[in-house]
Amino acid sequence: MGSAAYAGLYSTQDILARQDVDGVTVGDALDAIRYRGSEPVGALKLGAFVEVHIEQGPLLEAESKTIGVVDRGQGVIWYDGSIVGASAHTGTTPMNHRRDALAALSELVLSVERIALGYGPRAVGTIGECRIAEPSRNVIAGDVRFTMECRSAEIEVLDEFDRRTRKSAADIAGRRQVGIELEAIWRKDPTPFDPGIVDTIEAAAARLGYSRRRITSGAVHDAFNLALVMPAGMIFVPCKDGISHNELEEVSQAHCTAGANVLLHTVLSLAGVASK
Amino acid sequence: MGSAAYAGLYSTQDILARQDVDGVTVGDALDAIRYRGSEPVGALKLGAFVEVHIEQGPLLEAESKTIGVVDRGQGVIWYDGSIVGASAHTGTTPMNHRRDALAALSELVLSVERIALGYGPRAVGTIGECRIAEPSRNVIAGDVRFTMECRSAEIEVLDEFDRRTRKSAADIAGRRQVGIELEAIWRKDPTPFDPGIVDTIEAAAARLGYSRRRITSGAVHDAFNLALVMPAGMIFVPCKDGISHNELEEVSQAHCTAGANVLLHTVLSLAGVASK
């Protein structure tokens, strides 16, 4: 939220008025912990922004690399979807009379997976949530809501993914006589990082003797908001089994140290005070 | 519950002690509406049991038949199932590193559907409920619970369905490196009705001039419990679009009248007092 306000994507007022599920606003929560500052957002002018983060994915660990030099972030499209078929008794409704919303969703889940797999490492696509309205073990699901997303660092792939997924949904809807709605509720185009910052990070890692590779960020980070208004870049370190947003998330002390060292040397270089 | 207690499948005490989701027992609820009788369950001896019901399926309507002469009820197996894969970030986890529990369930849903379709009208199979643990739009589903059922009037088909579904689940689990558990929590073998009762119902419908066909009951009814302890049978009438357990459930006055007339003439025949 801070980086989005700094980059002008939202106003400070809008951010402060946002509420959590209990109705507590960001402004109230900041006051409660005495973190609401007096300086206007954006008053502090920065020459560059560099962020260290765990990869949240498996690539660095799999290739035994210590440092990920992030050169870009994936674009994302988020969708809300629904499938409406017909609820009916599971015991009395012949298979060929059914309009099963869960079976239709199952086809769509596998179709999204197949489309994403076809792009190799260039895209991911996921249906992560689904909820059947009034579920029962002896009622055919008649109404299913779900969310879907696709991500790619290439805008053409993102657009093609959107077209192919919609076509697949229309095919399934026609064949199974169900209604499928797909609404794109959020889109962020792929973000390249500043080449000068990326090169500086790579040179710092090399000078420090860390193994490294260029990498695309799969997740969205503050640096992508700030990249809209200043040169920005990111440094990734490996995490165990690529696990993140999970109590099993783990990163070694040695990798944290390496990330901090690369950050320090990158910032010194950008400030023009790095030792040779 | 009444027919199950009458047939001795459960004791009266067990039935009276069952609770709804608010903890109200059947005994308390019967007392509240003054429906708890004083006569012991089973004291009333009956020579036969004949039940009228809407079909709850689409066959009679589709074939423009007024009366369904039910000759048997399907067997049923109910399952509780779970799939455990790995939760992970949707943006950072490459497609070929995933252990997506919802994608595995999707394959199983379509496999159950395909197996059932292969038996034509001789079987139905359904996954009607699924619930993702801690769902989120940017987390790959790591843990999904579901229910499944299969039904057939032929015990061999029921057993084969069980074997083939378990094999399919094992294939999916192996290929996707997820754990799939399938627990059969209830099984009822197919129930044939008494041939004498079935013939009597058919003769009554013929004498009254109603179009008719033999039919299998897809749902479970009181008559199947009572068939364990006396000759029993059922009469079906058509319902609109086969819809049941739904506010759209509808049956015409004419079809209700026809069902009641066949019931009356069947009972008079069984009592030996029908006019010729």
Image (cartoon, coloured by chain):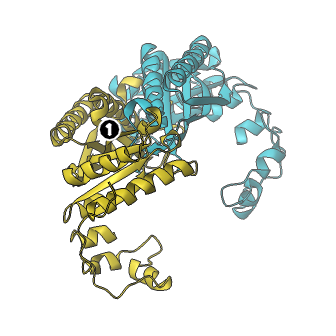
Chain colours: A cyan, B yellow
Q: A125 left or right of A9?
A: left
Total marks drawn?
1
Q: Quadrant of the C terminus of chain B?
A: bottom left
Which secondary structure lies at badge 1?
Answer: strand
Foreground pick, A48 / A124: A124
State the image coordinates of residue B111 (x, y, percent, origin top left).
Answer: 31, 30
Foreground pick, B186 / A268: B186
Is residue A249 among what the camera can see? no
Q: Quadrant of the N terminus of chain B?
A: bottom left
Q: Residue at x 34, y 58 (%)?
A: B275
Foreground pick, A199 / B208: B208
State the image coordinates of residue B92 (x, y, percent, origin top left).
Answer: 47, 29
Above or below, comparing residue B40 to residue B255 in the picture: below
Above or below, comparing residue B262 to residue A164 in the picture: below
The crowding category of the residue bearing disc 1, from other C-alpha atoms within 10 Å (few below 14, some 14 to 19, many at least 20), is many
Instruction: Name, please, the residue furthest toward the top.
Output: A156
State the image coordinates of residue B105 (x, y, percent, origin top left).
Answer: 36, 36
Instruction: Name, please, the residue furthest toward the bottom.
Output: B38
Residue placed under numbered mark 1 in the picture: B124
Is residue A269 among what the camera can see? yes
Q: B141 left or right of A234?
A: left
Image-quadrant location for residue B141: top left
- Amino acid at the residue labelled 1: Val
Q: Residue at x 54, y 41 (%)?
A: A143
Q: Residue at x 63, y 15 (%)?
A: A196
State the image coordinates of residue B122 (x, y, percent, origin top left).
Answer: 27, 34
